[in-house]
Amino acid sequence: MMSEGVRARLTVMRYTLAENGLHRLAFGLFALLMFATLFGPALAPHDPLATNPSEALIGPSAQYWFGTDQLGRDVFSRVLVATRLDMFIAFGAVLISCVIGSLIGAALGYFGGTLDRVASRFTDVLMAFPLFVLAMAMVAALGNTLMNVIYATAIINLPFYIRLARAEVGVRRNLGYVEAARVGGSGHFRILTVFLLPNIASPVIIQASVNLGWALLNAAGLSFLGMGVRPPTPEWGILVAEGARYIASGQWWMFLFPGLALMLAVFTFNLLGDALRDILDPRART
Amino acid sequence: MTRIAWRLLSAIPTLFGVVLVTFLITRVLPGDPAIFFASNPSMSADDVEQVRIALGFDKSLVEQFWIYLGALWEGDLGRSISTGQPVTTEMLKRLPASAELTLFAFVLAIVVALPLGVMAALRPGSWIDQACRITATLGVSMPTFVTGLILIYVFYFLLGIVPEPTGRLDPFMFKPPQVTGLIIVDGLIAGDLAVAKSAAAQILLPGITMALFALAPLARMTRASMLGTLSSEFVRTARANGLSRRTIIVSYAFRNAMLPVVTTLGMTFSYMLGANVLVEKVFSWPGIGAFALDSLIALDYAPLQGFMLIMAAIFLLVNLLTDLLSGLVDPRAGLN
């Protein structure tokens, strides 16, 4: 029972995947990331929190693939286990801003009027701030906790979704099918949720997948500065911050591996965004 | 002219919103500032109350906002608790450091990204196009703090070809007399080559770190925009008329491709302002970003407030400039 649209989409997906190696890479890396998220804690060869002072600051070896830190903890296990937390932060923040932002934006684009003008001003104001600093200040104001890092990241991403959904709904609200729905007796709520929102899903999903990488960079940047996650909890940003203290004495593995993991994850999301754009919106291909 | 005036006026509500949001955020921040001022433990609750009144915290929020607005009008951003100096003084002292770093990185990014984007567009699918694509995707994927640390490890620790990554100048050198505030330029003006060279060596790594970050959107936009103009009718006509390849690329395709690039330039510059904080932190760069961060950690909120305001104001200014520049690059852009 596959609808015509879904089947057509799958065909496009097969086509772009077969044609484009980078897209295959994107989906492959994403699968790897999800695998590490789900099974990371189960697969970690060592306890990520167990200290072992007699084996502190050992370079990468067969036993400790990514070496050990100043307390003798296994860096590989810590990086692997951190995947779940980092994904939780990135997906959590993007999900919140994506859902709330597109609802607000769609409503603004549909109804227009004074409220729309005021709200647009408000998004202008939010976007005028250097967003990372705004997130920093918000975490400081709300309290230095993990959830507040997620909320702050979600809030600084809100304007992008509001603008996108507003513009996408704005061009559609007077189209024939919306008109038909209105004549057919559908209320505003039904028109928005049944006819408009599903039609703007593609651009929103593309935006969300690119946004995942950005949200992750932001959150990791915050924890690099010591906000949100607290040691000894393993999280990539904080692991890089801890490792940075040992650069001057040459222990490069402590900062490099979590840094590379972070980079790889963001790289994956960016590639995935490109791939999804090609699949969901073939006209925009370059 | 009317357009410029109109555009200036339209920035005022946003600016007001920025001031309001900054004010509100710093009022919600934890920690009673009065208790900080009255940090002496022997002070009684009564004394703390005196300080609160002196600082105006007993007044209503609306009243406080009016007082704050009045002070802003006179260029008063409050006083930093940790340094004891007015925030405006502190900011002005550190602004040149941030400006030098951002400008250096910005110019570096433009010099690399524009040719890269153009060359990629000229030969789509070639190795240089792939290189452009990979550089762009890697560039946006690299957390600035990780890039910075990798550069420090390789070029300072392993190879030892750059000076210790702390500050703007070799600690044993004296700053040249301030003319522009940019040490490299000031050193050259003063004819002190050693100072200019030292400052250039110091700025290299943080500059590259920031430039890498800014390169990606610029190269991407240049490529996409050039591809668009190269396949347009007027380029085909020019080619059919037998104009030289150089003329077609430079004066037909590139000039017309500049409009979206200029807009992206403005956006990128503003992004870089935000990224400043992390890069300045990693390289101990004595700029306003690092200052704001240190103040935040020390629960000293006036500098943070000032930093956010200055950044937002610069952002609005850059947007304004971008708009005006787009009008110059393509007069049609201003018509609607």
Image: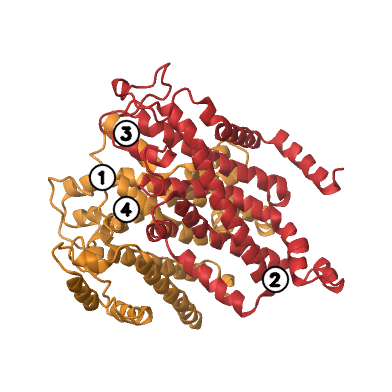
Chain colours: A red, B orange
| Left or right: B49 as drawn, with respect to B17 | left
Residue corresponding to mark 1: B202
Q: Calculate the distance from the C-alpha at mark 1 to the C-alpha at mark 4.
A: 10 Å
Within 10 Å of the Cα at label 4, are there few (<14), some (14-19), or many (20+) other Cα atoms? many
Question: In x, y percent, where is residue A201?
Answer: 70, 55
Question: In x, y percent, where is residue B208?
Answer: 37, 44
User: Residue at position x 27%, y 78% from top?
Assistant: B56
Residue corresponding to mark 3: B153
Quadrant placement of the C terminus of chain B = bottom right
Q: Amino acid at mark 1?
A: Gln
**Which structural element holds mark 3?**
helix
Do residues under tags 4 and 2 come within 8 Å of each other at their CB atoms? no
Question: In x, y percent, where is residue A275?
Answer: 65, 42
Residue corresponding to mark 4: B101
**Which structural element holds mark 1?**
helix
Q: Amino acid at mark 4?
A: Leu
Image mark for residue A110: 2
Q: Give the mark nearest the N terminus, 1 or 4.
A: 4
**Which structural element holds mark 4?**
helix
Depicted B215 relative to depicted B156: above or below:
below
User: Residue at position x 38%, y 41% from top?
Assistant: A238
